[in-house]
Image (spheres, rainbow, N blue to C red):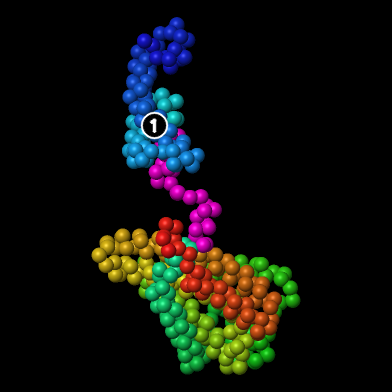
Amino acid sequence: MRSPILSSWFGRGEVAAPPDVESAVLRSDRFRLEREGDWARLEHIVKRMESGRLRGISDEDLLALPILYRTAASSLSVARETSLDLATLTYLEALVQRAWFQVYGPRQGLTRWLSGFLFGGWSRAVRAIWLDICVALFVMLTGTVVGWLLVEQDKEWYYRLVPTQFADARVPGASREQLLETLGTEEGANGLSVFAAYLFSNNAGVAILAFALGFAFGIPSLLLLVHNMAVLGAMLWLFAGQGLEWEFAAWLSVHGTTELFAILLAGAAGLHIGRSMAFPGDRSILTAASESGRRAAMVMAGVVLMLVFAGFLEAFARQLVGGTADRFLIGGTMLALWLAYFFAYRRPAQGDES
């Protein structure tokens, strides 16, 4: 009996097909008939999962899903190698792709993931690395003290620590009026958006580098935190020398409570990976790095959001709000909100009984 495909190709059998073509078509028909039952079952399961009707799928079908997927993937591989007909090949490619998303793909959409991230996932990841946060905080405070002591001992250290873009009028020997002017406000927001972009880029670079260097057992991350905070210590020494320590602290707090918190979390995330690799316990180093890496990546996703927010605070709120008390109010409010979110807000994970 001639294959229906042959009939469509050769005008209902009026023209004889070459033997090699007929043999290939018959082989394709036989290949499909032997396996199309499994393909149809897989397609039925996938359709129900795509439509969200999971309750209508039996336990037997759910257990068979991975096996049916691997069978279809194997059939697709054979179909490609043996150059079976295009219709079969196209059908299998679409079926395998759809089944892959159900077996291995994400279980939730972007909106649902973002909701879970903001309302519990991020804060849980931060609390999970509390020990690394404590170590990173100690290192940052130490770096600030080191920067202060270095410039107090030798003013030349100020020029070695402070970047040139910050050393305009803010240099040793500047008068109180000159330093106070650098803490002033802008007349308007013109050009501040460009400043925000620059600050975000700079701060994001520090945070990402502190995280990325964590693979070397966290040591480079800690050194980077020390250096970054030594700059702050040097500038704090400069303003304190003219009795402007509170004005400088207020000026810094507007964005600093968010920006420095973000850098703290980034350094802690890098340290978390490095510490897990140095002390993996009963796990392999790769397993420890993988587990800590997923947790640290969750923290870093939030760090990026914090840095974006800090960039706007630095470019707009800090430049447009001039009063010391008002600046402290903004900075203190932001610090309280971050602390409350990370350590007081404890929404249970999905599936928890508490």
| Image quadrant containing the N terminus | top left
- In the rendered image, is residue 98 in sight? no
Q: Which residue is mark 1?
A: 41
Up-down relation of residue 288 to residue 175 (above or below):
above
Magenta part of the protein: which range?
94-119
Residue 201, percent from left and from top: 56, 67
Instruction: Inspect this view and state whether residue 330 appears.
Output: yes
Residue 75 among magenta residues: no
Q: Residue at x 44, y 72 (%)?
A: 267
Residue 191 in the figure: left or right of residue 2: right
* For residue 127, side relative to residue 308 (left or right): left
| Location of residue 122 with respect to 67 vertically, above or below | below
**Point 58% across, 74% down: residue:** 334
Kindly indicate the quadrant of the structure image that contains residue 164: bottom right
- Position of residue 348 relative to residue 130, above or below, is above
Q: Nearer the viewer, residue 134 or 245?
A: 134
- Mark 1 surroundings within 10 Å by alpha-carbon count, few (fewer than 14), some (14 through 19), many (20 or more): some
**Quarter residue 189 falls in:** bottom right
Q: Residue 58: x, y in percent?
A: 38, 38
Front position in the image: 238 or 91? 91
Q: Name the amino acid type tagged 1.
A: Arg
Residue occupying the far left of the picture: 282
